[in-house]
Image (cartoon, rainbow, N blue to C red):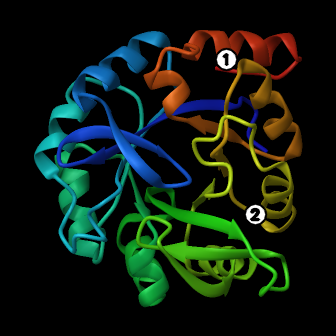
Amino acid sequence: MSLAVRVIPCLDVSAGRVVKGVNFQGLRDAGDPVELARRYYEQGADELTFLDVTATVDDRATTYEVVAATAEQVFIPLTVGGGVRSAEDVARLLASGADKVGVNSAAIARPALLGEIADRFGAQVLVLSLDVTRSAGTESGFVVTTHGGRTETGIDALEWARESIERGAGELLVNSIDADGTRTGFDLDLVAAMRAQSSVPVIASGGAGSVDDFAPAVRAGADAVLAASVFHDGVMTIGEVKARLADEGITVR
């Protein structure tokens, strides 16, 4: 586990606007990505994650102009995902200002993509994004989905994470679809299961509802904690989350 826990706001973007839903459904407008990025940078975010949540569904590339405009406002690591299908897509995103790139659906369709990205740019650039839901049909009880949570793959989430690390993924962004947007807390079983078999940092995502939800995720094994709607809606600030973590004896940046 890393020495200091990172607090990461997530911008789920569609058609150039930040959106948020519940369990990946019912997306609503949550603001301008550039304005929100600047706000979170000023609040002390350690990193920022930008996910074009409809790029894969719409079969198009990530909006590079929005990424570039966002990158101009923040001077912290920026991870960008959504619609990444090739090493060339990664090169273009890095040129647009991304520091790391998240890959999900395209890697499931063609796992060799992970090695191509890691070999060309380094594992530190490659974030495996896992949209996970509970399922009785897999050994671990967790299955990977694609296309913004719309399509279950039948692939065991833990097996896929393990394979992806072997292929070069340098970080796991583990998003619980079941908890997403519910504000009932992170899926601690999922976090712990991923931590138990991951040799790379684990980012817990999905379910944050109060400042008290973050420390349990860290104790379950998260190296970083990610949230979206609670920050967009002003339920809490980055600073308040860090203060609560520090009160719990957890080192933050």
Query: Going 15% across and 51% down the picture, which residue do you hit?
Result: 64
Foreground residue among 39 and 3? 39
* Apparent side of residue 128 relative to residue 209 in the rendered image (left or right): left
**Amino acid type at mark 1:** Val
Which element carries disc 2, helix, strand or loop?
Answer: loop
For the residues labelled 2 and 1, say whether their Cβ atoms are less than 8 Å apart.
no
Outermost residue toward the left in this view: 65
Number of other residues with Cα within 10 Å of mark 1, as a class: few under 14, some 14 to 19, many 20 or more:
many
Q: Quadrant of residue 53?
A: bottom left
Please name the residue that numbered disc 2 is placed on: 199
Q: Nearer the viewer, mark 2 or mark 1?
A: 1
Is residue 14 positioned above or below 127 on the image? Answer: above
**Which of the image's four quarters has the C terminus?**
top right
Point out which mark residue 241 bears: 1
Q: Give the farthest residue toward the front.
A: 26
Q: Quadrant of residue 230?
A: top right
For the N terminus, give its image quadrant. top right
